[in-house]
Amino acid sequence: GVSSEGTLDPHINYTARYWPLFNWTHDGLMAFKKVGGAESANVVPDLAEEMPELSNDGKTYTFKLRKGIKFSNGKDLTVEDVVASFQRIFKVSSPTSGSFYSGIVGADKCLAKAETCTLEGGVIADAASNTITINLVAPDAEFLYKLAVPHAAIVPADTVMKDAGNQPVPGTGSYAFESYDPNASLIMVRNEYFQEWSADAQPKWYPDRIEYTFGGTEEAAGNAILTGQADFMYEPVPSDRLAE
């Protein structure tokens, strides 16, 4: 790539360059189906065991959380992490907090005063039944799609409540960010704690390691691919090289 595009924080980064990468490092309650073609626009349960139960005229969603999932730092995923992650969306002023997630009960208070955000009555954990209940102020036909994007990624409850910047935030995906230097490279490795729970939502890894380097030109990237030194480039191929 020619350059990096800012923070590695999944709740903050809003770029076409990094969102595809977060799909492999982080999970939400829902995910877009990992297939080619039109079906890839469908949402499937990811950290949720199955599609949520809807009640209260479409305003209440109840999700059963999968058991036995670990973050890339070895910690077990719990319902507390889910609640903290939704609070974190507001506490770090995620770019879509006022649009995608403003319909959650209690979001208005969080948007007014981020640091005291609780989403009380909006996102409720029940450890005994391993469920999360999300209450909306009004029905939202797009809500499950909003839960499938990186801004709704579930991260550990003890994650720093500000922009994590260049420090990788643990996720539950098949890959983990090993290191990040915005001027040089982004390295992804297999998450050693990952066990495939749904090929539709989070398929298991293939390569051991993915090295994404920054600082070259489109010309150099094209040459690297032609000579087999690289597998992909983010920038468009220079038009005069398309025939090659």
Image: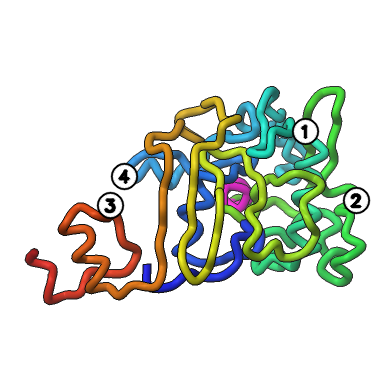
Q: Please state if 48 lies on the left or on the right of 212 as rendered.
A: right
Read off the residue under disc 3: 231
The residue that label 1 is drawn on is 78
- Whether residue 145 appears in magenta in the rendering, the answer is yes
CB atoms at circles 4 and 2 under 8 Å apart?
no
Magenta-drawn stretch contains 74: no
Q: In the picture shown, does residue 217 fall above or below 101?
A: below
Q: CA distance from mark 4 to mark 2?
A: 39 Å
* Residue extent of the magenta highlight: 142-149
Q: Which residue is mark 2?
A: 120
Above-or-below relation of 223 to 189: below
User: By what rule are the colours in the image chosen?
Assistant: rainbow
Tell me which label, 4 or 3, sits earlier in the chain.
Answer: 4
For the residue pair 138 and 4, the one nearer the viewer reads as 4
Q: Earlier in the sequence, mark 2 or mark 3?
A: 2
What is the CA distance from the residue labelled 4 to the residue labelled 3? 22 Å
Q: CA distance from mark 3 to mark 1?
A: 37 Å
Mark 2: amino acid: Glu
Hey, what amino acid is under mark 1? Thr
Disc 4 marks a residue whose amino acid type is Gly
Query: What residue did someone put label 4 on?
Result: 37
- Element class at badge 2: loop
